[in-house]
Amino acid sequence: MKNNSTMPITCLQWRPNSTAMKTSNILVTSAADGTLRHWHATSGKLLHQIQPDPENHIYTMDFNADGTLLALAGRDLHVHVYDETTKQLAFKMKEGYEQCGHSNRIFCVKFNKQNPNMIVSGGWDNTVQVYDTRYRGPVHSIFGPHICGDCIEIRNDGYTMMTGSYRMDDVIEIWDLRMFKRMRTIPWEGTGAETDFVYEEAMTERTGNDSVLGSITNNTYDSTNSFASSKDLVKKQHKLENEVAPFLYTACFNAR
């Protein structure tokens, strides 16, 4: 598939194969200039192209279960829902039902595949907005997750949602969409927050030219040198930068 545009691709999505849509193997891409393209992956041909708003950078998109609707979002704080049959905008959502919607860029939008009326989105404003397409707007919001990539996923049970945040603490969180409450957090070693901190002996505790550098894993000190007590150690930093990717950009469940 050849694209003559010089603008970078910001996101892509395979359209689900279903009886509702005749053509299969359709890949949809969006570019930094707001251009939306439909490609036939088998032949490599460009089937359709639109540019609704050159100023609206599209950062995320998702199809509903049968591929008849495409939701996309980005810079303009709205969730745009397109009809895949006509390739026209069906409606867009921002505020509504006593909810203000997003106040900053949106980096993830997802359909709930078990509930055709539910869409969720998250971004830089530390909220996850929950939309009901029948009301054409958000009906609930969850404060907390700082979404900077494709880091929202809903399990096949239709109510368990995972969010991944761009931060050092509480990175992976599991939510119950029936009560809109957090159920638990999942430790993620990529932050360096759970294991392998680098500790160094406090300067005031030793004299001379001796220097000791060790690591603590699961709260157990591991070094050939011994210390009188844990007070002799001071935490210096998380894992070295070349050993850890400290922030999360994408996450998903398996098929179940």
Image: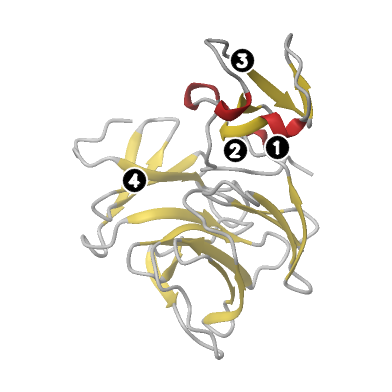
Q: Of the residues shown, which amino acid type is indicated by label 1?
A: Glu
- In three-dimensional space, the C-alpha distance between marks 4 and 1, rounded to whole angstroms, equals 48 Å
Q: Of the residues shown, which amino acid type is indicated by label 3?
A: Val
Assign a secondary structure to mark 3.
loop
Residue 146 in the image: x percent, y percent? Answer: 52, 58
Residue 6 in the image: x percent, y percent? Answer: 18, 38
Q: Are marks 1 and 2 in contact (CB under 8 Å)?
A: yes
Q: Callout 3 environment at 10 Å: few (<14), some (14 to 19), or many (20+)?
A: some
- In three-dimensional space, the C-alpha distance between marks 2 and 4, rounded to whole angstroms, equals 42 Å
The first of marks 2 and 3 along the sequence is: 2
Left/right placement of residue 204 relative to residue 149 reads: right
Residue linked to disc 4: 47
The first of marks 4 and 3 along the sequence is: 4
The first of marks 3 and 1 along the sequence is: 1
Q: Are marks 4 and 3 in contact (CB under 8 Å)?
A: no
Whether residue 28 is visible, yes or no, is no
Residue 126 in the image: x percent, y percent? Answer: 52, 65
Q: Marks 4 and 3: which is nearer the front?
A: 3
Q: Of the residues shown, which amino acid type is indicated by label 2?
A: Thr
Whether residue 115 is visible, yes or no, is yes
Most foreground residue, 198 or 57 = 198
The first of marks 2 and 4 along the sequence is: 4
- In three-dimensional space, the C-alpha distance between marks 4 and 3, rounded to whole angstroms, equals 63 Å
